[in-house]
Amino acid sequence: MTIGLLKQAIHALRHESISRTPVRVNRWFKWMAPGLYVKRWLLLSAAGVSLATLGIAISMKWTPVFRTTQFFGWILQQTTEIIPSYVSGPLVVGGGLLLVWWGQSRTLDAITEVLMPNGNEDLIDVLLAHRRLNRGPKIVVVGGGTGLSTLLRGLKQYSANITAIVTVADDGGSSGRLRREIGVLPPGDIRNCLAALADEEKLMTELFQYRFQAGDGLTGHSFGNLFLTAMNEITGDLEQAIAASSRVLAVRGEVLPATLSDVRLWADLTDGRRIEGESSITEACGAIVRVGCTPENPPALPKALVAIREADFIIIGPGSLYTSIIPNLLVPDIADAIARSKAPRIYVCNIMTQEGETQGYSVGDHIQAIDRACGKPLFEAVLVQKQMPTAKALIRYAQENSNPVPLDRDVVSRLGRRIVLANVIDEEEHTGVVRHNPEALARILFRWFTKVQGL
């Protein structure tokens, strides 16, 4: 049964087609653009061919310079006697340029056919995008869950220098089973981020998110989780497994766990209970007073600290406040590195409250929860959704004890944070589900970043 499902998945992937209709402009003007590092090497190759030919002629004592000059002189004399120079000259120039264009065009078409067999985009467009994205700012995004992967889908259109620092406190679902049975760090949030940053995002997302529906021990597991677990066993640790997986998936950016320690969350509730385990905290449906982790003060991944120190822009969230965002900040070195950073730092507040975590919370409550967990302010601005969702969405979420996060301007101002108001949501027409729009969210964040940089 499992083999049959795998065959069906492979068959579906083989027939996946991505239809794109790129706007075509004059490719040759693009090839003349500076910074591609193509023209110089073509000219260098042509010069090398000419020099090698000249060397062969000299070695065979053909006196090439004299003979070549003599030959061309004879050709020119014969040509001008038949056709006037004012006609023959432009014809020869045009013929030469035509041959150059034809040869270069066929060469580039051959290269494109090999490198891009699907023909969805022009090679020059890919090269230009590659150069533009590689010159983009160094961005660090901290969080977890679906919120972080949603943001990454938008950010990768602006820069290839993205580092996602992801929580490893998950203990539910497929990740929790792998954690208990094999002893690996939970791969679920990392899997989502890798799929979001992959060049072939739609195909990779479907493959990585594919969940087995049958098979002893396979039911409920996602292919991506098993893939990362296997890579973890092969490479020796999760950091190397992610790096190897990123190369396989052609990931645009980098995904890093906040720590390699086996972190387990706990939360103290207002009714006196202490709940242990990330998945159990939300299920307890209590008001959270304080969160922590075991072991206390886990060490940060050194590479994550380097990324924060070198960052031009730091974004915290979006995601579940107590189970996706704060777990990263319970690693003291990460919180300290963000606090010391001189880069613009912004928190993306959730659109809706979450039962069992932030029920009844305002924007100010979200900010204060992060400040309490870290013992210091980490960001200077907060991005808040401007317009309310539709009535259909409000009714749907009210049935789950969830409501839009209200903006308490006076509290946020007292906390010393600037407010960035924008419409950054997508609402599914039939279900009323509300999520951040990746493109709109990334666009607003970059607009704010550019404005702050200008100041």
Image (cartoon, rainbow, N blue to C red):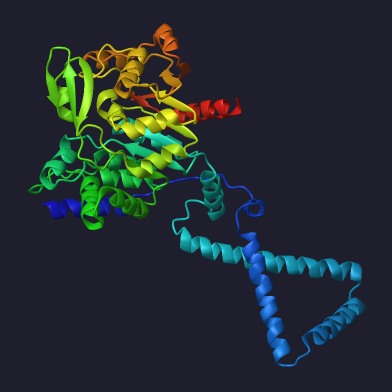
**Side of 399 where 252 appears, left or right:** right
Q: Nearer the viewer, residue 181 or 265?
A: 265
Residue 84 drawn above or below residue 52: above
Q: Nearer the viewer, residue 396 or 157?
A: 157
Q: Nearer the viewer, residue 338 or 126?
A: 338
Residue depicted at x 87% and y 84%: 74
Q: How many numbered discs?
A: 0
Residue 274: % across, % down: 13, 21
Quadrant holding the C terminus: top right
Q: Would residue 119 be visible to someone looking at this image?
A: yes
Residue 331 drawn above or below residue 403: below
Q: Would residue 220 be visible to someone looking at this image?
A: no
Residue depicted at x 22% and y 47%: 223
Residue 36: % across, % down: 60, 54
Quadrant for residue 206, please give it.
top left
Q: Nearer the viewer, residue 397 or 159?
A: 159
Residue 113 drawn above or below residue 204: below
Q: Residue furthest left?
A: 216
Residue 394: % across, % down: 30, 13
**Side of 48 where 62 appears, left or right:** right
Residue depicted at x 50% and y 51%: 121
**Side of 12 where 342 appears, left or right:** right
Residue 220: % across, % down: 15, 41
Q: Residue furthest bottom?
A: 61
